[in-house]
């Protein structure tokens, strides 16, 4: 799931799990990382050893773990023998227990810890917005520790980091662009790079450098592979002698190694991976997906007739702005003779291995809409960051049971807006600077952005988007920037400051104005001193020297030269003009100014002689 991903503590996953008899503790850790497990036996002692456990048919087998003192070690720790596995491999995935002997393997099984090893992968999922896809930094299981942040790379270069594993923009096809991701603190365990080669209305093709996704197409995970996926999947039902179900895709998948996932009443069926499936008599509804693209799940259909329990969603991934409102929609059906006792939405949040399901009441900023046939809407107003979660719709039957399912619900990510500068917030004139109105998930392509400089909207002739390019940047671009979304212009980002340094030796208007202001002070003082010297030269040479030195070294004459006046006493204003004969566009979407003969600087702020505190 989107919001149940991995985390790390220092240079390994440090997971201390206390066992409960008869209960399986499950740990999902990142491939290549380290894991520490504590003995989950009911009465652990320092003499206990570690074992793996598995079933061989109907026989439970317990094997002592081989310790090499390097990659796999364990030492007694306050009567809790700790098992350490470094550089985790897929072969380390197993059931573990600690015991004093191999008698009664069932006791080992009753206190087992399941270790699941996952790699990191960039999943490519078709978007509903035109011919685009969305990217997800994904693992094969919900990682036990919540990550500090996800880091995205483009063509091997750092792009940005964020708390959400959802890439912040929709992506179009471009073979030369490669994307990758990592978890903060584990930058050396990056996901294999992926490029989006082509996107049509029915299919999209991606190329993976290597990794788990390639194992679905070929035997080796260490070689690159190109995979074509459909943009739509649905179950097609044919009835001749018996009902046959086909996982039909929007484009023909001719690869003989393409595998499929089938879900019976919402639970995955691991017995078949073929494109066709029979209709089991005990199954009410069925759905399917292409293996490796389980996020694109077909709608549930009734296996026998149109009267069965089904729950489907209009959209399974929603990106919404903090402070806005969102509608989460579900379509459902039920047998005519069995009306639902109730219809409710649940919020699922995860923290590590803990999963909390919360019944959502229609109160406060939450509303239910159930006035359309077989259609139910959950509306959340004034969205907050903690509304980010998975939402599932459930029907309660007359006997009080809820329709359960393994299939995912709707993932909602609530994002704010943040201004980011590339390459930096402090630059030198002449550089290229890109401002991004950054989000934690991709808003729709038709989103229009408004840019502000010093709280004033920038007038740009084109549709403003989330990127604002200053090329080349000048001192006139310096200031406080913020951004907002046009349809929610009351929702804006915080201001971020762009500082632009002048090039050494280059006369900028601001610098020229400053020098002019200094000259206006120094020249009159020099003339005054010269006249005074003439008048007093015949009276006292010693006083002349003293006065002359005092006038030439009067202390701090001024503190600041500013382009705007400030509220201070004894301000002096002058007008200084400098010639300028070049056209410099302020912003990439603004036409260049015409050459001008004079650029007036009407405000030069000179403070009186003061001593700084």
Image (tube, rainbow, N blue to C red):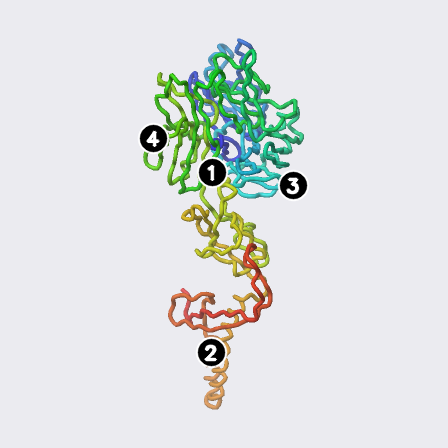
Distance between mark 3 and mark 1 Cα atoms: 27 Å
| Mark closer to the chain start, 2 or 4 | 4
Q: Which residue shows up at 52% across the image and 58% down it?
A: 477
- Can you identify the residue that label 2 sits on? 551
Quickly name the residue at label 1.
319
Please tell me whether residue 15 is drawn above or below residue 525 in the rendered image.
Answer: above
What is the number of the mark on residue 361? 4
Q: Quadrant of residue 78?
A: top left
Closest to the camera, between mark 2 and mark 4, is 4
Q: What is the residue that sits farthest to the right in this orientation?
A: 223
Please tell me whether mark 4 sits on a helix, a strand or a loop.
Answer: loop
Provide the secondary structure element on which disc 1 rests: strand
Q: Which of pointers 1 and 2 indicates the residue nearer the eye?
A: 1
Q: Measure the C-alpha gap from mark 1 to mark 2.
A: 67 Å
Residue underneath mark 3: 176
Q: Mark 2 or 3 closer to N-term?
A: 3
């Amino acid at each position: 799931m989107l919001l149940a991903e991995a985390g790390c503590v220092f240079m390994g996953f440090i997971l201390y799990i206390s066992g409960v008899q008869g209960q399986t503790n499950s740990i999902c850790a990142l491939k290549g990382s380290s894991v520490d497990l504590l003995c989950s036996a009911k009465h652990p002692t320092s003499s206990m050893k570690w074992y793996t456990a598995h079933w061989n048919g109907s026989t439970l087998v317990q094997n002592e773990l081989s310790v090499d003192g390097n990659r796999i070690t364990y030492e007694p720790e306050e009567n809790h023998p700790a098992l350490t596995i470094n550089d985790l491999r897929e072969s380390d995935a197993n059931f573990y227990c600690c015991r004093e002997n191999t008698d009664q393997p069932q006791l080992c099984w009753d206190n087992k810890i399941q270790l699941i090893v996952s790699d990191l992968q960039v999943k490519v999922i078709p978007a509903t917005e035109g011919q685009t896809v969305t990217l997800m930094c994904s693992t094969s299981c919900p990682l036990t520790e919540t990550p500090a942040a996800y880091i995205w790379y483009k063509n091997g270069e750092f792009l940005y980091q964020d708390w959400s594993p959802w890439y912040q923009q929709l992506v179009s096809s471009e073979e030369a662009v490669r994307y990758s991701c990592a978890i903060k603190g584990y930058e050396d365990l990056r996901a294999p790079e992926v490029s989006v080669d082509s996107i049509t209305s029915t299919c999209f093709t991606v190329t993976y450098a290597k990794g788990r996704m390639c194992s679905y197409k070929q035997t080796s995970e260490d070689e690159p592979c190109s995979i074509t996926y459909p943009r739509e999947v649905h179950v097609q039902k044919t009835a001749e002698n018996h009902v046959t179900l086909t996982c039909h895709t929007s484009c023909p998948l001719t690869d003989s190694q393409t595998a499929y996932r089938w879900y019976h009443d919402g639970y995955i069926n691991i017995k078949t991976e073929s494109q066709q499936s029979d209709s089991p008599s005990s199954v009410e509804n069925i759905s399917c997906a292409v293996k490796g693209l389980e996020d694109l799940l077909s709608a549930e259909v009734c296996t026998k007739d149109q009267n069965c329990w089904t729950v489907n969603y209009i959209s399974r991934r929603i990106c919404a702005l903090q402070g806005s409102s969102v509608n989460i929609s579900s379509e459902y059906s039920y047998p005519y003779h069995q009306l639902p006792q109730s219809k409710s939405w649940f919020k699922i949040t995860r923290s590590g291995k803990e999963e909390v399901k919360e019944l959502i009441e229609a109160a406060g900023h939450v509303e239910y809409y159930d006035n359309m046939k077989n259609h139910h809407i959950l509306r959340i107003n004034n969205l907050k960051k903690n509304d980010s979660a998975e939402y599932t719709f459930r029907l309660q039957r007359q006997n009080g049971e809820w329709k359960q399912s393994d299939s995912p619900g709707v993932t909602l990510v609530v994002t704010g807006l943040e201004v980011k500068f590339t390459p930096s917030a402090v630059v030198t004139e002449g550089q290229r600077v890109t401002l991004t109105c950054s989000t934690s998930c991709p808003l729709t392509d038709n989103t229009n952005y408004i840019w502000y400089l010093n709280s004033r909207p920038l007038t740009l002739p084109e549709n403003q988007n989330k990127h604002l390019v200053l090329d080349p940047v000048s001192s006139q671009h310096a200031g406080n920037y913020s951004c907002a979304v046009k349809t929610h212009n009351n929702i804006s980002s915080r201001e971020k400051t762009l500082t632009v340094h002048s090039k050494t030796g280059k006369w900028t208007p601001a610098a020229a104005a400053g020098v002019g202001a200094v000259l206006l002070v120094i020249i009159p003082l020099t003339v005054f001193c010269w006249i005074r010297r003439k008048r007093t030269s015949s009276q006292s040479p010693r006083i002349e020297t003293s006065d002359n030195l005092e006038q030439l070294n009067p202390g701090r004459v001024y503190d600041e030269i500013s382009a705007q006046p400030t509220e201070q006493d004894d301000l002096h204003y002058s007008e200084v003009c400098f010639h300028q004969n070049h056209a410099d566009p302020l912003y990439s979407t603004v036409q260049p100014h015409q050459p001008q003969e004079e650029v007036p600087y009407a405000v030069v702020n000179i403070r009186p002689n003061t001593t700084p505190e």
